[in-house]
Amino acid sequence: MRYMPVDFLKETHMLAQPIYDTNFNEQLLATSDLTTSRIKALKRLGYYSVYIRDEKYASDEQSVTTEMLRNLYVEVAHVFTIIKTSSKLISKNKIGLLSIDQAKHLEESFNVLMKIGEEVILYLLKDRSPNIHLFETKSIDLYSIQHAVHTSIYAVKMGLKRNLNMRALKNLFIGAILHDIGYMLIHDFDTTKIGLLNESQKELQSKHAQFTVDILNQCNNITSVTKTICLQHHEKEDGTGYPNRLDSKSINPLTKLLAISITYDALTSDRPFRPAYPIHKAIQIVKNQVGTAYDSLSFELLEEMIVPFPIGTVVKINNELGTITSYETQPKYPVVVMEDGQTVKLTDYRSMSIGLNYRDT
């Protein structure tokens, strides 16, 4: 399996992962051969890059099942829809109260998410791999939903590495899933274009964490810890975050895991204002903010679990192309088969420069 920009696709390629439409129906199946019209459909659906089949290279197993991911996508989409269509939109920084039925519907969806979340936690707990593998093809149009789900999985994986108990993991999971629901209260706010906001939009955007808590306060099945996580997810180590400019000691440790997960997933996602960063560059960007935005422990946990160059990735070494085929000991130093057939073990050449062949920006 290989990850490839849509612009590089050919009709000889076959998808390795299903492609979803905005209702999370499988629009293009993984068993389908690509055609010119299907490649155009990928672009129309907001996909910039996809996973394609390549039998030459075995792939790492996905850390959670495709069924779990889709179930989460569908339920998060349901939560977003309930809030968008049934709650009163904000008016001068305040939101209207939900009706009893509206709050009940949200609580029911939250219960479904908690149940799936427990399945995800137990599944990750059984996974002995120190790394996280999410081979989901991301769509710009589905960004908010996929971002919530992927962020929750990254955060829980780090929580497991910290040996958190089940209660803490559940709070972390549901906090990660729901951290951005406050955006749904902002009329006509487009979360896919956050990098292109004007000053008034930025001011409104900075209030979404409080709006999230305002929603959660009207439901009876969300813990105070989860609400704290949601409220604090944009606070920073140096006290320059929002909404309350908390210092490091005042930020919940679970929030710190969520915050770094949010940034990593955002960086590795295609956005209308920029393409996704390659994994190794996203890690470097996060690393550069340790001590200001993020704490060192959370970064160490993130770095330990992320594979910077997944198996099947086409890379460039000393201006020559090769493909990642396996790892010996550390994902940072993979085994690369060059175009001329030479095998290069980067454990023997740790100072050697390695970069992506596609969109190494």
Image (cartoon, helix red, strand yellow):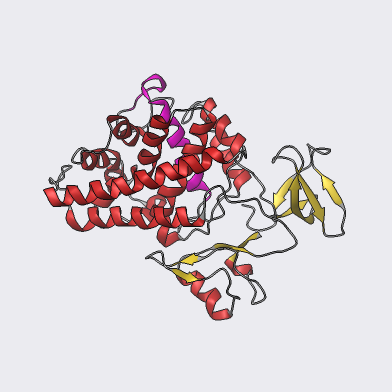
Which quadrant would residue 235 be assigned to in this image?
top left
| Residue drawn at point x = 27 percent, y = 37 percent | 222
Kindly tell me whether residue 199 is visible in this rendering. no
* Near-viewer residue (310 or 141): 310
Q: Main secondary structure of the magenta part?
A: helix
Q: Is residue 136 magenta?
A: no
Q: How many marks?
A: 0
Spot occupied by residue 327 in the image (x, y as percentages of width and height) = 74, 44
Spot occupied by residue 324 in the image (x, y as percentages of width and height) = 74, 52
Q: Is residue 16 above or below residue 203?
A: below
| Residue drawn at point x = 46 percent, y = 40 percent | 121
Q: Is residue 251 magenta?
A: yes
Horizontally, is 203 left or right of 86 in the view? Answer: right
Q: Is residue 150 above or below residue 217?
A: below
Spot occupied by residue 105 in the image (x, y as percentages of width and height) = 21, 52
Dividing the image into 4 quarters, which one contains the N terminus? Answer: bottom right
| Residue drawn at point x = 48 percent, y = 32 percent | 159
* Near-viewer residue (170 or 320): 170
Horizontally, is 339 left or right of 75 in the view? Answer: right
* Near-viewer residue (224 or 358): 224
Kindly tell me whether residue 180 is visible in this rendering. yes
Q: Farthest residue in the top direction?
A: 249
Spot occupied by residue 210 in the image (x, y as percentages of width and height) = 25, 38
| Residue drawn at point x = 54 percent, y = 37 percent | 286
Task: Look at the image and give the residue range highlighted in magenta.
Answer: 245-268
Q: Is residue 120 above or below residue 321?
A: above
